[in-house]
Image (cartoon, grey):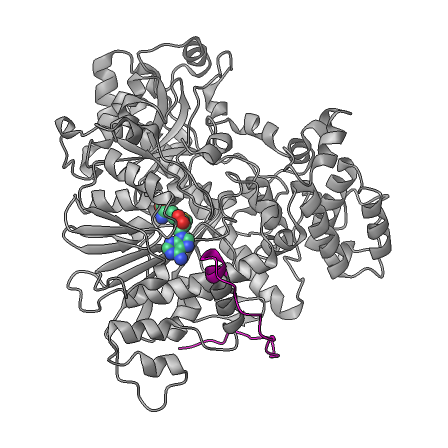
Amino acid sequence: MGRRAKNKQGDPRPIADAKENYGKPSQKKLGKRKADADSDEVTKRPAKKARESLPKEDKKSSKGKGKKVAFAVEDTSAPSKKIKTKRKEPVEEEEEEDDGGEGWENVEDEESLKAHTKSLFNDSDDEGFVGDLDDLEVEDDDLLQGPVQELEFSSDDEELELAPSRTKGKKSKQHERPSKIIPTGSDDSSDSDEDDEDEDGPITGANMEARSRALDAKAAREAELDALEMQQAAVVGEDDDEFADVDDVDMDGEGEGEGDAEGFHLPTAEERDEEKKNGGPDVHTVQRRMRECVRVLGNFKKLAAPGRSRPEYVQQLISDIASYYGYNDFLAETLFQLFPVAEAIEFFEANEVPRPVTIRTNTLRTRRRDLAQALINRGVNLEPIGKWTNVGLQVFESSVPIGATPEYLAGHYMLQAASSFLPVIALGPQPGERVLDMASAPGGKTTHMAALMQNTGVVFANDATKARTKSLTANVHRLGCKNVVVCSYDGREFPKVMGGFDRVLLDAPCSGTGVISKDASVKTNKSERDFTLLSHLQKQLILCAIDSITPDSKTGGYLVYSTCSVTVDENEAVVDYALRKRPNVKLVDTGLEFGVPGFTKYRGKVFNEKVSLTRRFYPHVHNMDGFYVAKFKVEKRQKAKGKADDEDTAAVQGETAEEAQEDVEFDSDEDRPYLEEAKRKRMKAKGLRPPPRSKPVERAPATVSATA
Ligand SMILES: C[S@@+](CC[C@H](N)C(=O)[O-])C[C@H]1O[C@@H](n2cnc3c(N)ncnc32)[C@H](O)[C@@H]1O
């Protein structure tokens, strides 16, 4: 099991329990909170208290308005189903009493359990099972130890270990479950009828699944609408005032002008410095101040103290967010700016909660319903993730370590974050194709692609970090993928190494700001410079990925670019850059049924309007890791009409692979310092002495302009 993941995503926790993890100080910054923690209950679990003491979201009142937003993240769990297994733990019996009468409680004997499972995991939506259990080649014990994790870059696909659950004695599992992963457009089709029935029909085993999905779909629609509206509000507001946000957020639902501002004083810059010198205020003060700042920023004209500006409140809030949640100031500000004020708090709160544990059925070895049955028999409480995936299962509770079951060892499933399914679904590799996974370790997506291709064609699974290809190879073997070739090149060497691919996945090395709930070190271990360097690496990689695809592909010609980060510089800015540098590619719909459209404008930058076809996924909206997916179609290169507007355009006409590679080279002033820095690093790594740094070129700050 991954060292890191082991500590990060444990057993699926009920939202109530998960709250106890809130405010678990990140090593560096929250020592203060820890120290306070001894004094009383509030400081022990600051975030939890914050959630409890702060106004809760009123989903209904916010519906369709996107105005009233909560400080705290609500448990949006849809009513869950329960699977009663043959193995009866005391806790199960207790639950039965609590939740008796639900449809699932009727599933008592093995036969009905099987029938029930069958209906739940309707085979019709399962990918074809193309393997044979007798085929299993589990010869090498080492391969069964699970992947070695070497975490240089953030990855969403860590192998997660679900420790045996210790929830005996808890009253109701309904309340223990984490909220479901928000799906699904396809659910929409069936939900209208079911919505109607919601009001009057009793919940039975037969309708439980459908009704649960209808509720999920409804929640998804509402959440996405809210997020979209808030995103739009942010963009509109941006034009007037850099710090403008939703002006009418009513944090406490008490109505305009009211609230608990009494006695609240927004510190001046000097007072803030003084406060910092003295070790900062106690956690109660920080909480209260955050709440007040959010409230005031939600209705600034009415609630602001005379003479105090919006940026002052914003600065105070960002500073408090940084200290309360344990981020460095740069990252706190970068993430804060992505959302309207109140939504930003939801995002930070969601980062304190583990995401649901999910697994992906390996259809090369088994079928989802057979896997589900086998795991249920071992005491695993699970259900399908949602209609949007026919291979995913969400694990709610398990009495066995989910990363060490015989089924796991035999490669029947991959422990994989739900968000990681998305780029592969978007790419849709076809049997017989030639596919490149440019940054592939530890292979969650590679093995998914191999399964979709039914072990035909070929997947070149590349990763620059040699050590990480060990875990990649182990997973490829464990899951029985026979169409995978593992290699280790810097992605920027493609297509020189090889080209002519039908499809390429570039799941790029990134900062991991989408997976903070798994890896809290991201909060503090990345500087502004790291983000800039990453963005440049991503830009170089995406051009190489594009150039590795053959526009002549009969079946494909697609690139999917994805990251487990939510920053604009690593996502929309990279995609926009690729569109500008490679006129022969265009963005196409990802085909994903949910997700928030990518930004087309962001803090003064204007991107290609088609960037709205890309999709963002957020922990507080979709209950998944933060993620980004863009899909490109690569077309034949046209002869440029007239003079090319940048030197790259000319270079792409009728070029050879070698020329295309040259084309990837960065030669603008913008890129030169980063190229030099990368070159220095490479030389150092080889034990060579790098040349002295050249003087930085003075230039006006670049703004990204829209292209047609
Ligand atoms: C987000 S992870 C990939 C996760 C993987 N796609 C999966 O699904 O399991 C990014 C990977 O990029 C690799 N990487 C970093 N720089 C690279 C480069 N220049 N070329 C190719 N791979 C690179 C890292 O070693 C890391 O394994």
Q: Is residue 577 above or below residue 189?
A: below
Q: How many marks?
A: 0
Q: Residue at x 21, y 64 (%)?
A: 500
In the foreground, 666 or 235: 666
Which is nearer the eye, 29 or 14?
Answer: 29
**Residue at the location (56% across, 64% down)?**
235
Q: Which quadrant, please, contains the N terminus? A: top left
Queried whether the magenta region covers residue 695, the answer comes back as yes
Most extreme residue toward the bottom is 642
Q: Is residue 223 visible?
A: yes
Left or right? Give the position of 297 relative to 654: right
Q: Is residue 358 above or below residue 682?
A: above
Residue 572 in view of the camera:
no
**What residue range appears in magenta?**
681-708
Q: Position of residue 481 (x, y in %)?
A: 21, 40
- Image spot of residue 227 (x, y percent): 51, 52
State the residue at coordinates (28%, 58%): 504
On screen, 50 above or below 436?
above
- Residue 405, placed above or below residue 264: above
Q: Is residue 84 left or right of residue 90?
A: left
Q: Which residue is more in the foreground, 694 or 138?
A: 694
Q: Main secondary structure of the magenta part?
A: loop
**In the figure, residue 39 lies in which quadrant?**
top right
Image quadrant in which you'd find residue 368: top left
Residue 708's spot in the image, x, y percent?
39, 77
Confirm whether the magenta stretch covers residue 699. Answer: yes
